[in-house]
Amino acid sequence: MLFACLYIPDFPVQAALRNSDCNLAEQPAAILDGPESLLKVFAVNDAARRSGIDRGMTRLQAETCIGIVLRKRSPIQEESSQAVLVECAYGFSPRVESAAPGIVIADLTGTESLLGAPRQIGRALQRCAEQCGFIAKVGVASNPDTALHAASGMEGIAVIAPGKESVSLSRLPIEVLNPDASILDVLDSWGIRDFGALAGLPPISLVERLGQQGLILQRLARGEVQREIVPCEPPLSIQECIELEEAIDLLEPLAFVLNRLLEQATARLRARSLATDVIHVTLELEVHPDRQLKGSPCASVREPYERNLKLPVPTQDSKLLLKLLQLDLAQHPPKAPVKKITLVTDVALLRHTQTGLFEPLAPEPGQLEITLSRLNAVVGEKDAEGRLRVGAPEVLDSHAPDNFEVRPFRSLEPVTIHECLPSPQLALRIFRPPVSARVEVKQGNPAGVVFNGSKGKVLIAAGPWRSNGRWWNRREQWDREEWDVTLGGDTVAGIYRIFRDSLSGLWFVEGMYD
């Protein structure tokens, strides 16, 4: 049996500052928690402890430390960081337990022939955590609890040989076991300060005085507890979050921060051989309604500000995702400075395609998506009728004239080459919206058409073709009669389709045949 524990000291501090440029090994940092009116220090790093900062201090007391970094506690960042640790351990074992915040245990039994010696595995696990932005300690032992105590109580990489658990753990302080305060007071009054002293007590007398809890603590101190770990599932989505020290009100610095989050998210995707096709970005804005002028666009801002990005093909390219987010935010900018960014990527399988030798190549999906985003920025997203302006047209299942919608590209299928039709065909160029017209009618047939300031004589007329529908909905109801006419004249000569709206009695020119 072989288990490894990945332990992150001062986990709330490292989780809050993982995406920042703060050097936790040298710069003091503290995490604040509590109500806004009375924030107190919740967690500190070693540099802050050396500077005299401790838990329970107020914000004003902590600010007396020169150069200290203060952040408010963020459960979202801690949850995201814990998911990163779980994914890191999954790169070494298919059975991983999330024991506590900042503590992950992996079952390495049978992996020595693939990953190497226990110390080599521990070193690789530590490097993986460092690449994710953590300062980690690793313990390797023959049971999960011994690995946990070795990681939390020793420095660097601690490897406990089988059968040497009691001797290796003997110098660890009793606080590593995290006993109840009442039991800790009793042990302190007995002069029990470390694992070795607790392991040497007679078990029967210990149970008589401390009950079963005392016996469990002694077995843990001896490294004798054997248990099965409780495996957890890898997260179904990847979340990255950062709380900014200063709010950002320009797109360029915002893109710089988004680039860092996207690089971390795509690195986690690549580690799991996955990709993403949906990105959710939530921006928390810095808004002070009491300071805004009346009528200011910031006065009515409701936070948070959310944007969703959907791609036709899953990708792992952070540069592509960044460019698409930049184009989207340039078209829909937030109305106030950004103080917090949460980025969630849905996981998807990579798409592998292979075209035939004689099939034309389709455009590269990422570059096509960027081109479509730029077109959206130029022509706008939707027309007057609420239809998308850029995408693939799709005819709806209805007999209503010109009834279609434009949907975003979702897949890139191989291009199919159709054989040319043997005879020429007419194409109708639709006018949107239809052009209003005045029509002269003789004996039930159109004889002349006036539109766009020009008049044409009807040389040939075919029709009428009558259609109606949606009679149960007045807003969507239609009733019309259509004619195909050949007009003569200097400026309007050609073949047109005209129709009369029976509900309003008005005439329109719908299109021209090419």
Image (tube, rainbow, N blue to C red):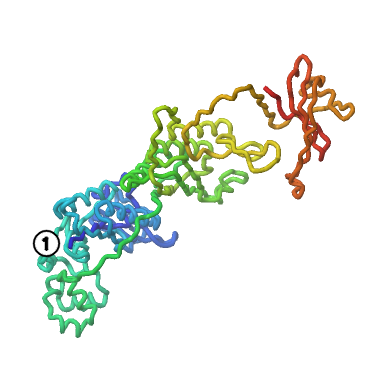
The quarter of the picture where residue 164 lies is bottom left
Residue 20 seen in render: no
Residue with the most extreme top position: 490
Q: Which residue is mark 1?
A: 161
In the image, taking residue 148 as reference, residue 70 lies left or right, namely right
Q: Quadrant of the N terminus?
A: bottom left
Question: Which residue is depicted at the point 50% across and 40% down?
Answer: 410
Q: Which percent across, then down, holds residue 511?
A: 71, 27
User: Identity of the amino acid at label 1?
Assistant: Ala
Q: Which percent across, then down, holds residue 186?
A: 21, 78
Q: Which percent across, then down, holds residue 419?
A: 54, 26
In the image, taking residue 354 as reference, residue 207 lies left or right, namely left
In the image, taking residue 54 as reference, residue 223 lies left or right, namely left
> Which residue is nearer to you in this view: 107 or 184?
107
Q: Please rate how many residues cluster around mark 1, counting C-alpha atoms within 10 Å: few if below 14, some from 14 to 19, many from 20.
A: few
Q: Which percent across, then down, holds residue 61?
A: 33, 58
> Which residue is nearer to you in this view: 211 or 184?
211
In the image, taking residue 276 as reference, residue 186 lies left or right, namely left
